[in-house]
Amino acid sequence: MHKILGYLFICIGVLGIFFAAISMYKVFVDRQPVAPVVQLTDMNVNTQYGALSMPMQNINTLANLGLFALFMMFVLSAGSKLSLIGVNLVKTERLREALLERGETVSPQLEQTLKKL
């Protein structure tokens, strides 16, 4: 049972890693636009020489790219953690099977030792 769940976690984690890597490649290399999360309007500043309008389009683009990169790093780290959980589940199960194959009994103390490996 743990082996199936472990391999499922590994597959989900690897898919999350590939999704994050491909999405970042499309945005930063192929220059596809990101979803606009931040929408700042042009800023008007009153000076002694009159009203001055500051365009915020470049800041919008930079903020949206930064938020996208931050979100993709979160997805990447979540995928790596899921894969690590899956690897640990599979590793413990395979060690347990190897011990049972040799004819040794698996005591609760040995089970705790296997989980630490």
Image (tube, rainbow, N blue to C red):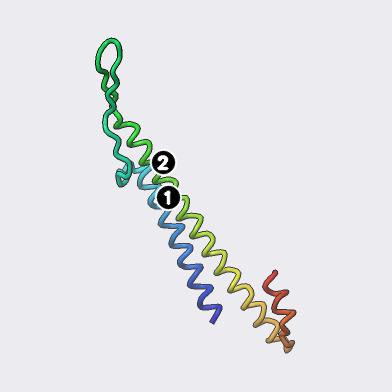
Q: Which residue is mark 1?
A: 71
In the rendering, at what x and y percent does residue 68 appear?
Answer: 39, 46
Which labelled disc corresponds to residue 66?
2
16 vs 100: above or below: above
Crowdedness near tag 2: few (<14), some (14–19) or many (≥20) residues, C-alpha within 10 Å: few
In the rendering, at what x and y percent does residue 94 appear?
Answer: 63, 77
52 vs 82: above or below: above
Residue 36 sits in quarter: top left
Image quadrant occupied by the C terminus: bottom right
Question: What amino acid does circle 2 point to?
Answer: Gly
Nearest to the observer: residue 49 or residue 24: 49
The kind of secondary structure element at disc 1 is helix
Question: What amino acid does circle 1 point to?
Answer: Phe
Crowdedness near tag 1: few (<14), some (14–19) or many (≥20) residues, C-alpha within 10 Å: few
- 70 horizontally vs 48: left or right: right
* Sequence-wise first label, 1 or 2: 2
Residue for point 27% across, 33% down? 41
Residue for point 73% across, 74% down? 113
Residue for point 52% across, 64% down? 82
Which labelled disc corresponds to residue 28?
none
Residue 55 sits in quarter: top left
The kind of secondary structure element at disc 2 is helix
